[in-house]
Amino acid sequence: MSAYKGDGVILMEDKIVVKNLDLYYGDNQALKDVSIVMPEKSITAFIGPSGCGKSTFLRTLNRMHDLLPNVKILGRVLIDGQEIYSPDMDVVQLRKRVGMVFQRPNPFPKSVFENVAYGPRIHGEVRKHRLNETVEQSLRGAALWDEVKDRLHKSALGLSGGQQQRLCIARLLAVEPEVLLMDEPTSALDPISTMKIEELVTVLKQKYTIGIVTHNMHQASRISDHTAFFLNGELIEADDTGVLFTRPADKRTEDYISGRFG
Ligand SMILES: Nc1ncnc2c1ncn2[C@@H]1O[C@H](COP(=O)(O)OP(=O)(O)OP(=O)(O)O)[C@@H](O)[C@H]1O
């Protein structure tokens, strides 16, 4: 993996290609000329000190900023070669293809079943047997089925934090996404729940392209294939995780991963 520079050839296995991306919140530039590729069916971790733009970057990949006023975005984001900021992009379809989970699990105050069935329903599925199948497959896919199969019609808010986070992942899987974005998905969880999510993520990469923001460098080195280091809105370095953590090319990366700042 490399930080994408210039107009080179886009490889088939590059699911996401970002070129010269700038993002401004009003006058504050939060992303500066970011160019990177995210290879298909692999995990890319985004690391860097607080406020360096990791979450902002992740949110550009499914146009989450569309919902905020005063945000200006320049540059290009391509998914499967398609410009996601093109005016004819269907944003509802984009968010189905590129799903996101957040730091705090946010299930709806509905049953486990209804949480997972929600997405397929809003995309038009009404057949009961199809919904049942999708809910079961998605919960299995999120390694949650065995824990909830006897309480499908009870409130999702009665689940533990770790179970709620896996439910949020099941909710994404139910609409058959291609890319899963995770913004510090384990930072509110205990070590056992964290381990279960980490195991799950490494299984999910067989089918999905995954981007994960983490403050935990052990986590990044344990689970990711590629790591990107951000500082003050700039992408300083992106490389295979093994390389970035052992032979970083930039002194600032080395200082960060060795704990000298951040
Ligand atoms: N909705 C917003 N409106 C205005 N400025 C914002 C908004 N969200 C983030 N910022 C600013 O953009 C910069 C990058 O923030 P961002 O949350 O992307 O960083 P981060 O690396 O994810 O931080 P953390 O690790 O603390 O979550 C910061 O200066 C932040 O204050």
Image (tube, rainbow, N blue to C red):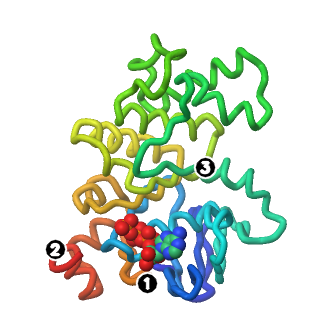
Tags 2 and 1 touching, CB below 8 Å: no
User: Can you identify the residue that label 1 sits on?
Assistant: 234
Q: Residue at x 51, y 81 (%)?
A: 31
Q: Residues within 10 Å of mark 3 (few under 14, many from 20)?
A: many
Which of labels 3 and 2 is toward the front?
Answer: 2
Q: Position of residue 193 (x, y in %)?
A: 29, 37
Q: Closest to the observer: 36 or 139?
A: 139
Dot 3 or dot 2, earlier in sequence: 3
* Amino acid beneath label 1: Glu
User: Can you identify the residue that label 2 sits on?
Assistant: 259
Tags 3 and 2 touching, CB below 8 Å: no
User: Can you identify the residue that label 3 sits on?
Assistant: 178
Q: Position of residue 131 (x, y in %)?
A: 68, 22
- Work out how far the residue at label 2 is from the one at label 1, CA to CA, in angstroms: 19 Å
* Amino acid beneath label 3: Glu
Instruction: Give the SS element for disc 1.
Output: strand
Q: Quadrant of the C terminus?
A: bottom left
Dot 2 or dot 1, earlier in sequence: 1
Image vertical order of residue 195 relative to residue 141, above or below = below
Q: Is residue 168 visible?
A: yes
Q: Closest to the observer: 21 or 162?
A: 162
Q: Quadrant of residue 130?
A: top right
Which of labels 3 and 1 is toward the front?
Answer: 1
Q: Residue at x 62, y 45 (%)?
A: 177
* Amino acid beneath label 2: Gly
